[in-house]
Amino acid sequence: MQLDHVFCLVDPADDWAERLAAAGLEPDAGMRHAGQGTRNRRLHIGSLFLELLWVCDKAEAQHNPLRLDRRADWVRSGASPFGVGLRGSLPGELAGSYWQYTDLGFPIWVPRDDQDAPERPLIFILDSPARPVGTLSRPAVSIAADPIHSVRIGTTSIADIPPYEGPAIIQETGAARLEVFRTGGPDVFITDILALRNADSPADR
């Protein structure tokens, strides 16, 4: 399996798009997730992407098995607003620990205990062949060319991430925080809990 993308739930009314624009970055137009109650925009960073995700239909999200409304309301619910998407085939030894989600029109494997522990980042597997190195999974309006070096997630509870190829994902117990480190470019503080960082930035900033 390979790392495909990471996501963060955002408030569509916040100024994250303006912050990205000020840094010369523009996420794509994104798409509506029918049946899931969510919408997104994606910022491609090398061959991976950062997904900015929000709930656009609360009732729909509340009736969807992923319950992303709880992650969107993370301050009150205690759920993690972050997720990690891998791409590839589910290893046979994990088959009993995952269930198949098909509402998006293609199979995604989700941990069976996800709803029992929403305080952990959501780890899921897109059941799709691994893509060639250096290619994008989807077209983008504009692309941040500097590749992702690593990802750091602050979380109250650590998620189990299956073995994969790609940048390291470091989970640390603590306040909600997602930092995507790339090999070039300035630090961009997209929201209060989401930042695009230069890999050479001081770790304690």
Image: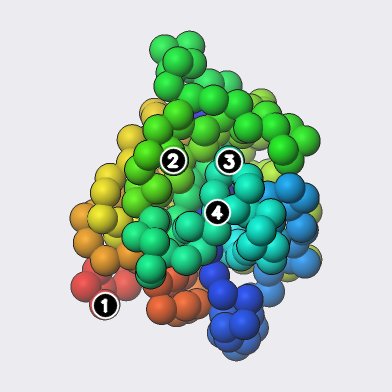
Quadrant holding the C terminus = bottom left
Q: Residues within 10 Å of mark 3 (few under 14, many from 20)?
A: few
Q: Is residue 158 shown left or right of residue 125?
A: left
Q: In percent of the image, x 54 and y 70: which residue is there?
A: 10
Task: Decide which of tag 1 and tag 2 comes sooner along the chain.
Answer: 2
Looking at the rendered structure, the secondary structure element under dot 2 is helix
Query: Neighbour class for label 4 at 10 Å: few (<14), some, many (≥20)?
Result: many
Q: Amino acid at mark 3?
A: Pro
- Which residue position is annotated with label 2? 115
Q: CA distance from mark 4 to mark 3?
A: 8 Å
SS for dot 3: loop
How far is disc 2 from disc 4 in space, using C-alphas?
10 Å
Distance from the alpha carbon under mark 4 to that under mark 1:
29 Å
Relative to 200, does residue 170 appear above or below in the rendering? above
On the image, numbered disc 3 is attached to which residue? Answer: 65
From the viewer's perspective, is 59 left or right of 154? right
Q: For the residues marked 3 and 2, what is the alpha-carbon distance in whole angstroms?
A: 8 Å
* Amino acid bearing label 4: Leu
Q: Which residue is mark 4?
A: 68
Separation (CA) of disc 3 from disc 1: 37 Å
Q: Which mark is residue 205?
A: 1
- Return the residue nearer the eye: 182 or 19: 19
Whichever of callouts 3 and 2 sits on the residue coming sooner in the sequence is 3
